[in-house]
């Protein structure tokens, strides 16, 4: 009997995947994860979470472009990191540490991509 992952499970798996590094996350897994987050935020009824969902949609579009535009993906990740950071204080206490970690990771990884002009 499979259960839907909880937002706590989704948060933990997202942090774990990002800690491994962006190039270690298969595109299909990234798309599945972003889709799950986007749906959860769109259904929240909270405008600030719906703004995050819209940026996730933008990120999904960027991830399907060929060739990938690292600086544009970086700007999207950085914006998502900023948006998550703004929501951390209003989150339930048990989620604040995870959201803070997620925000820090998104900002760091986004910043790395924004300044990477050669794609390594």
Image (spheres, rainbow, N blue to C red):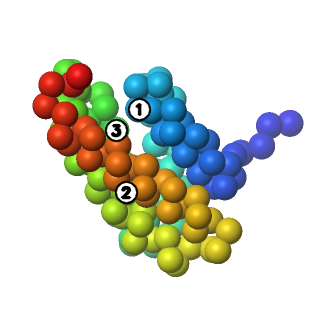
Find the distance from the CA under tag 2 to the CA under tag 3. Answer: 15 Å
Q: Which of the two discs, 2 and 1, labels the residue nearer the N terminus?
A: 1
Residue drawn 56% across the image and 73% down it: 91
With 95 as the anchor, is 60 left or right in this view?
left
Instruction: Rate crowding at label 3 as few (under 14), some (14 to 19) or many (20 or more) other CA atoms within 10 Å.
Output: many
User: Would you identify the image quadrant in which residue 1 lies?
Assistant: top right
Please say whether residue 23 is visible from this viewpoint: yes
With 38 as the anchor, is 4 left or right in this view?
right
> Could you tell me which secondary element the residue under label 1 belongs to?
helix
Q: Which of the two discs, 2 and 3, labels the residue nearer the N terminus?
A: 3
Instruction: Rate crowding at label 2 as few (under 14), some (14 to 19) or many (20 or more) other CA atoms within 10 Å.
Output: many
Q: Does the residue at mark 2 contact the one at mark 3 (Cβ under 8 Å)? A: no
Find the distance from the CA under tag 1 to the CA under tag 3. Answer: 14 Å
The quarter in which the C terminus is drawn is top left
Q: Which of the two discs, 1 and 3, labels the residue nearer the N terminus?
A: 1
Give coordinates of residue 53: x percent, y percent.
39, 55
Q: What's the mark number on residue 81?
A: 2
Q: Examine the rendered structure and indicate whether residue 47 appears above or below residue 43.
A: below
> Could you tell me which secondary element the residue under label 2 belongs to?
helix
Residue designated by label 1: 22
Q: Residue furthest left?
A: 117
Residue designated by label 3: 60
């Amino acid at each position: 009997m499979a259960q839907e992952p909880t937002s706590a499970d989704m948060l933990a798996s997202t942090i774990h995947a990002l800690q491994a590094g962006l190039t270690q996350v298969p595109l299909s897994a990234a798309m599945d994860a972003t889709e799950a987050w986007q749906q959860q935020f769109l259904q929240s009824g909270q405008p600030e979470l719906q703004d995050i969902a819209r940026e996730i949609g933008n990120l999904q579009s960027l991830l399907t472009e060929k060739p990938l535009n690292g600086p544009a993906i970086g700007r999207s990740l950085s914006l998502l990191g900023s948006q998550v950071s703004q929501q951390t204080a209003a989150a339930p206490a048990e989620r604040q540490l995870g959201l803070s970690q997620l925000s820090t990771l998104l900002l760091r990884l986004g910043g790395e991509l924004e300044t990477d002009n050669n794609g390594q």
